[in-house]
Amino acid sequence: MSKKWYDYFISVEQPKQGDPAGEQPSEVSATAAQTVADIASGVEAQTKFTAPVSNPTSFEEIYQAAEITVAPHGYTIFKIADMLQSEHIRGLPANVKKSSVLLALDAAGVKVEEVVKDAVIRDKALDAYERVQEKALQELETRKSQENRDIQAEIDRLVAEHQARMQRNNDEVAKEKERFFGWRLKKQQEEQKIADAVSYFVAENPISASGASAVSPPTPKP
């Protein structure tokens, strides 16, 4: 994602008060934008990380991994941001705040371009690390999606296997029921034969020709 750095650029080229030959605001903005573009083009397009980042929430660690160093004068874009939020100038108009920062930079012998370059380098590092994290996330999603598909396939295989076992159990019970009720029918016929023979000799027949069962009969096959 491109960044409009000229929105943040502090232009040192300001038209003199009442000078008709001075640059118009649009010309100053164009000059500032071109200056920033030149600075950005002078920064390596691809940020290289020379060390792993153990804590992605630590931007300082990201900057260190990208080997972004602080100039000896110590004026980074963050120091400028702190200066702009200082209790001494934060409530002042934007042009006054800008002038105050420019005076401080001039007194320290620091060029505005150095500060903007620091901002560009840090922004590129953040963008690059965002891409690193996004790629890692995509790779993780791909791996876990495949893992989930493998797990689901294993679940389906186990379900099919257990369903087959359950069906074999049901078939075994049904077969045994069929055998048992066939045997019981023959038993009843055998008992009836015995009861008929005994009935000639007793007043009350002691032979039971049938009996209740706690086992339900097999379900007829369609």
Image (tube, rainbow, N blue to C red):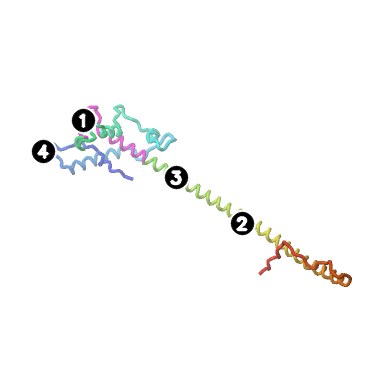
Q: Earlier in the sequence, mark 1 or mark 4?
A: 4
Residue 186 in view in this figure: no
Q: Earlier in the sequence, mark 3 or mark 1?
A: 1
Q: CA distance from mark 3 to mark 2?
A: 34 Å
Q: Which residue is mark 4?
A: 19
Q: Where the C terminus falls, by quadrant?
A: bottom right
Q: Which residue is mark 3?
A: 137
Q: Residue at x 39, y 40 (%)?
A: 129
Q: CA distance from mark 1 to mark 4?
A: 22 Å
Q: Which residue is mark 2?
A: 160
Q: CA distance from mark 3 to mark 4?
A: 57 Å
Q: Which label sits in the foreground, 1 or 4?
A: 1
Furthest-right residue in view? 201
Q: Which label sits in the foreground, 4 or 2?
A: 2
Magenta range is 97-126
Q: Which residue is mark 1?
A: 103
